[in-house]
Image (tube, grey):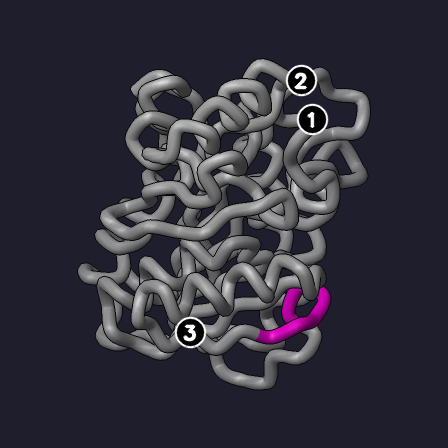
């Protein structure tokens, strides 16, 4: 669907549509203009406080669901850096299980909580850095954290529209993966899975970091539909 078709689908008022065309011409993301986006058979409110959910993240959810259905029964799930809540809400809707979701941005959590109501789900949202307020035993930790290096060139429409706090990370984009892997033992059960979405060229580096903290776990790299190494899965005592 083109951006113009997207606008025509969701905006019927002529004056609003004319205004939307101008905003689109001025470089605003079409999803922010419309105010919502479809994701994995659900619909989510989006604004400039949250990232726009992407197809790659739908793939992350899809593969994660397959692993969960194979190895877990009603797992306790934690989504770290939830943003719009699309990952957490979709998993809760599909699995009807206990899901926690965290974000350091209170503005993002307002959007996520509204999406929770919009989709009739029951995710527990928590305002904190990573998982420093989580005192539960977690079976599945999933995250699509900021992973763009500060010196990396990205599309102008992304750079000028989406929240930089959700895009960029120190240490060549690896900072949050390192922090999650270093500290997650404190909250994970003995049988667990960690699921990451990663940048185009980060999978092998993240796998190496994961081996330092979880040397006895099985670690898998999965490609997205365009052929990039896009996902890293760490499974412990599952197989």
How far across and down, in percent of the image, does residue 206 sit?
A: 59, 40
Q: Which residue in the rendered view is the most extreme toward the bottom? A: 135
How far across and down, in percent of the image, does residue 108 sit?
A: 62, 58
How far across and down, in percent of the image, does residue 21 sit?
A: 50, 20
Asked if residue 24 shows in the view, the reply is yes
Numbered marks: total = 3
Tag 2 secondary structure: helix
Front residue of 157/197: it is: 157
Asked if residue 139 shows in the view, the reply is no
- Relative height, residue 120 to residue 65 (above, below): below
Left-right relation of 78 to 71: right
- Image disc number at residue 156: 2
- Image disc number at residue 159: 1
- Relative height, residue 134 to residue 28 (above, below): below
Left-right relation of 46 to 223: right
Q: Which residue is mark 3?
A: 123
Front residue of 3/17: it is: 17
Q: Residue at x 32, y 64 (%)?
A: 119
Marks 2 and 1, how far apart at CA = 5 Å
Front residue of 29/89: it is: 29
Left-right relation of 135 to 53: right
The magenta segment is: 126-131
Label 1 crowding class (10 Å Cα cut-off): few <14, some 14-19, many 20+? few
Asked if disc 2 and disc 1 are in contact, CB closer than 8 Å, the reply is yes
Asked if disc 1 and disc 3 are in contact, CB closer than 8 Å, the reply is no
Tag 1 secondary structure: helix
Q: Residue at x 73, y 20 (%)?
A: 152
- Relative height, residue 155 to residue 112 (above, below): above
Left-right relation of 207 to 234: right
């Amino acid at each position: 669907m083109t951006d113009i078709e997207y606008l025509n689908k969701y905006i019927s008022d002529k004056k609003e549509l004319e205004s939307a065309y101008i905003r689109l011409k001025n470089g605003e993301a079409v999803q922010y203009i419309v105010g919502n986006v479809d994701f994995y058979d659900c619909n989510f409110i989006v604004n400039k406080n949250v990232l726009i959910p992407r197809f790659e993240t739908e793939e992350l959810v899809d593969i994660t669901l397959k692993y969960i259905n194979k190895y877990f029964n009603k797992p306790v799930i934690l989504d770290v850096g939830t943003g719009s809540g699309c990952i957490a809400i979709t998993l809760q809707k599909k699995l009807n299980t206990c899901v926690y979701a965290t974000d350091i941005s209170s503005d993002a959590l307002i959007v996520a909580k509204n999406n929770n109501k919009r989709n009739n789900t029951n995710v527990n949202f928590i305002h904190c850095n990573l998982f420093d307020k989580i005192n539960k035993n977690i079976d599945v930790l999933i995250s699509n954290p900021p992973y763009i290096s500060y010196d990396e060139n990205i599309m102008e429409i992304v750079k000028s529209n989406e929240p930089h706090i959700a895009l960029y990370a120190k240490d060549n984009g690896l900072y949050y993966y390192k922090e999650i892997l270093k500290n997650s033992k404190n909250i994970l059960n003995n049988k667990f899975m960690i699921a990451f979405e990663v940048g185009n060229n980060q999978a092998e580096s993240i796998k190496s970091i994961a081996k330092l903290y979880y040397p006895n776990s099985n670690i898998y790299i999965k490609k997205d539909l365009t052929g990039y190494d896009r996902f890293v899965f760490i499974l412990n005592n599952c197989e």
